Image (spheres, rainbow, N blue to C red):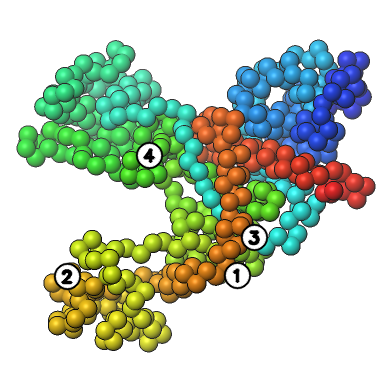
């Protein structure tokens, strides 16, 4: 059953004895004074539907620990150590000086309950309710979008390690799999298989043996009743057995080799199957997740956030995070959010996209004075395209306009195309949005706003990943999404206090 805090102070109450040592305006002091108001018992009643049994740790204490844990970047064990030994934590949680805290697994239990509930991010929502009540965002019509990559909490695995690991796990979890005859490796022995790794033929032979063992196990389990955990393991085995390999035509049927290249949705670790590979540039890449935030740039308040695999596109997530906002916002973002569909989605909600446009592609076979897309005049209503030489043609149903033989003898052809069959202009469904965006950017429309206000989101990102938060602490999207929401709640609370948050007779207010 749900426990509740005793409103009567104990003899050794930390707040009564040493509360004056905790700095005014700090998150610890604020939680000491207002945790019951911010995190009332009723807010967590659905997590403990039974009215019988041993009372849980009080909700306001758990919520306080979770906020401070996210603020200071502590593990569960470190958080409980701080609760046991740090006077600021004891004062914030309303505990006695001699209180020994509780076991770290209690935090795991509460996170599991929150994650399985209909409102997993209620701690973040509670702080957002404080933001709304203060009116600090009233009249603030700008929002900045950005994202940052977060490193996963596991080691990236190569193809051999993934195959061996999954075959070993399936053989252990499914009795029928353990009876299948395998020959690629002794899966009862630890470590990677012995192989002359610098010999391509030996590597291909090992891959063939491992893949054939995986296929033999999958065939043997076809049609056998499995529970949910077993089905997930078998499905993951099927995935890793096929994502990185292909038949080897040179060695004949039943042989396999590693595919040249990397699949976009490749599972990089069987320990954390939702983690993904992401290139920041051609030479820089990360493995893990991506944190997305919406920030009000004058105050630095995070109005919404989300966490996705690292290869998730920024634009669609950013547009979705703005769906709950009032219309009429100026949305500031970099070119990762500059696609046509995102601009159209923002316009549908009456938002103004102050977003750096994508750079126009250039033909490496042409000179520096080459024509680009914006040198062609497109009449989207009449469905025509006019080239810089003044030739007008119709747009095909496919969205392309092909000039073909009309390019013959054109004195500007060397600036326009290197194709033997002439110039083809390819138009997307949102071409008009992109043309307008590039024109506005060149004209400097809203550029002063962009340069003045967008940097605040970069500062918020820096706050977000400070104190060890560049690396996630959990496995999987849902667990780390909950962790991100707690981090955003703690940062918002700290920002509100810096802005003068207090509780007046009429409610929450900013000085």
Is disc 2 placed on a helix, strand or loop?
loop
Q: Is residue 210 left or right of residue 429?
A: left
Residue that label 4 marks: 285
Badge 3 marks a residue whose secondary structure is strand
Q: Is mark 2 in CB contact (under 8 Å) with mark 1?
A: no
Earlier in the chain: of badge 2 and badge 4, it is 4
Mark 3 and mark 1: Cα distance apart in space: 13 Å
Q: Nearer the viewer, residue 326 or 295?
A: 295
Is residue 289 placed above or below 229 in the rendered structure? below
Q: Horizontal placement of 438 versus 53: left or right?
A: left
Q: Position of residue 444 (x, y in %)?
A: 52, 69
Q: Which residue is mark 2?
A: 419
C-alpha span from label 1 to label 4: 36 Å
Tell me the mark number nearer the camera, choosing from 3 and 1: 3
Which residue is the site of mark 3? 142
The vertical placement of 508 against 114, above or below, is below
What is the distance, in whole Å, between disc 2 and disc 1 at their CAs?
A: 41 Å
Location of mark 1 (residue) = 350
């Amino acid at each position: 059953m749900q426990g509740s805090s005793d409103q009567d102070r104990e003899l050794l109450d930390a707040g009564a004895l040493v509360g004056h040592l905790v700095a005014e305006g700090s998150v610890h002091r604020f939680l000491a004074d207002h945790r019951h108001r911010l995190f009332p018992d009723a807010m967590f009643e659905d997590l403990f539907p039974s009215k019988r049994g041993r009372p849980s740790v009080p909700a306001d204490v758990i919520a306080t620990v979770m906020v401070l844990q996210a603020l200071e970047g502590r593990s569960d064990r470190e958080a409980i150590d701080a609760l046991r030994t740090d006077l600021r934590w004891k004062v914030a949680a309303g505990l006695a000086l001699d209180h020994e805290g509780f076991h770290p697994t209690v935090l795991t239990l509460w996170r599991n309950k929150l994650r399985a509930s209909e409102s997993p991010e209620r701690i973040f929502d509670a702080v957002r309710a404080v933001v709304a009540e203060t009116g600090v965002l009233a009249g603030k019509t700008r929002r900045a979008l950005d994202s940052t990559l977060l490193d996963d909490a596991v080691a990236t695995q190569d193809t051999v390690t993934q195959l061996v690991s999954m075959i070993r796990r399936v053989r252990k979890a499914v009795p029928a799999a353990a009876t299948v005859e395998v020959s690629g490796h002794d899966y009862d022995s630890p470590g990677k298989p012995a192989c002359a790794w610098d010999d391509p033929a030996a590597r291909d032979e090992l891959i063939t043996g491992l893949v054939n063992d995986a296929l033999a196990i999958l065939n043997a389990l076809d049609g056998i009743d499995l529970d949910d955990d077993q089905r997930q393991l078998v499905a993951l085995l099927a995935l890793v057995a096929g994502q990185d390999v292909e038949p080897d035509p040179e060695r004949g049927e039943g042989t396999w080799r590693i595919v040249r290249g990397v699949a976009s949705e490749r599972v990089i670790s069987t320990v954390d199957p939702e983690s993904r590979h992401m290139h920041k540039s051609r030479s820089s890449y990360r493995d893990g997740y991506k944190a997305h935030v919406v920030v009000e740039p004058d105050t630095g308040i995070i109005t919404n956030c989300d966490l996705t695999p690292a290869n998730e596109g920024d634009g669609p997530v950013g547009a979705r995070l703005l769906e709950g906002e009032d219309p009429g916002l100026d949305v500031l973002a970099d070119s990762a959010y500059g696609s046509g569909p995102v601009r159209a989605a923002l316009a549908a909600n009456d938002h103004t996209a102050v977003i750096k446009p994508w750079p126009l592609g250039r033909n490496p076979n042409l000179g520096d004075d080459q024509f680009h897309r914006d040198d062609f005049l497109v009449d989207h209503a009449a469905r025509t395209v006019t080239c810089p030489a003044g030739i007008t043609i119709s747009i095909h149903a496919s969205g392309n306009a092909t000039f073909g033989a009309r390019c013959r003898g054109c004195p500007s052809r060397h600036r326009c195309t290197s194709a033997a069959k002439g110039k083809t202009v390819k138009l997307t469904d949102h071409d008009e949005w992109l043309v307008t965006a590039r024109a506005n950017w060149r004209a400097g429309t809203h550029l002063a706003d962009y340069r003045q206000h967008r940097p605040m989101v970069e500062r918020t990102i820096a706050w977000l990943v400070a104190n060890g938060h560049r690396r996630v602490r959990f496995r999987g999207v849902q667990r780390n999404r909950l962790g991100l929401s707690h981090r955003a709640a703690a940062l918002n609370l700290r920002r509100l206090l810096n802005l003068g948050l207090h509780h007046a007779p009429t409610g929450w207010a900013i000085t």
